[in-house]
Amino acid sequence: MIMQSDIRRSFMARKSLFFVVLLLLLGAAGYLLWARQSEKQYEQSGVAEDGNYRLVAQDGSLFQRSGLKGHPYITYFGYASCPDRCPAMLVRLSRIRARMGWAHEDLPIVFITIDPARDTPERLDAFVKSLGVEIIALTGDPEVINRITDNAGVFVKVIPQSGASYRIEHTTKAFVYNADGDFWDTLSPMEDDARIEAKLRDAALSRSPTTETSQAASDKMR
């Protein structure tokens, strides 16, 4: 004879199982929705034959390289999980820029992730805020990121670690572009601040201004 307590326990067990399955289904649905939204967002990223790219910034907006024209800028390739070199170089470049009397608008620092699988806009936003510096952080479709790093000659090697984790060995030099968007020079972590400043000033003066805006920017950076 089945006891009432057995029936109650059986009912409670089925009820618990139902809620577990429901939570799993809701979680899966949420993940699929997030994945679709991410794919849709990254669909907008791309890179043209001339190297002009479209990537997603840390605030979720679409960023185009062509928008950098008119001022020299620095590009650094790295990833948010980098334990030391990436944060150190970004903070140092920002400090040098401030010491030279230049604002973010005068010399944008662009950080392009080489780890788009993990570096979502949200994660990049948290990374930038943790550094306390004003930079543009970009991510996008992995194939687009690969093309951009290949075009720039950036070395990238994924090193598997325990479990599913990994670290990435990569080029640690930053790339300087002049106001026309042309590659100008590299900045090595091994160079002293004075040498880096000299290269940045050379890049700022490497273009003859053609508008009042660019003329004013050039005069400010002399």
Image: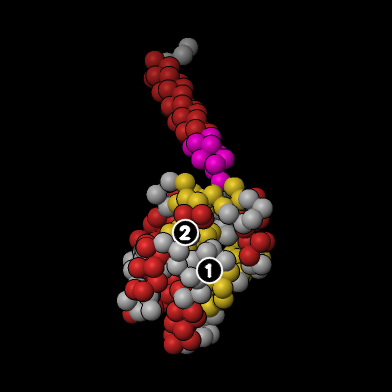
Q: Is residue 37 magenta?
A: yes
Question: Which residue in the structure is indicated by mark 1?
Answer: 177
Tell me the CA gap for discs 2 and 1. 10 Å
| Colour style of the rendered protein structure | secondary structure
Q: Horizontally, is 81 left or right of 166 in the view?
A: left
Using the rendered image of the protein, determine whether residue 192 is visible from the camera's viewpoint: yes
Could you tell me which secondary element the residue under label 1 belongs to? strand
Q: Amino acid at mark 2?
A: Leu
Specify the principal SS of the magenta part: helix
Asked if 25 appears above or below 116 in the picture, the reply is: above
Q: Which residues are magenta?
A: 34-45
Verify CB contact (< 8 Å) between mark 2 and mark 1: yes
Question: Which residue in the structure is indicated by mark 2?
Answer: 68
Using the rendered image of the protein, determine whether residue 118 is visible from the camera's viewpoint: no
Classify residue 94 by image quadrant. bottom left
Give the image location of residue 66, x and y in percent. 51, 54
Q: Amino acid at mark 1?
A: Tyr
Give the residue drawn at x 62%, y 57%. Answer: 51
Sequence-first disc among 2 and 1: 2
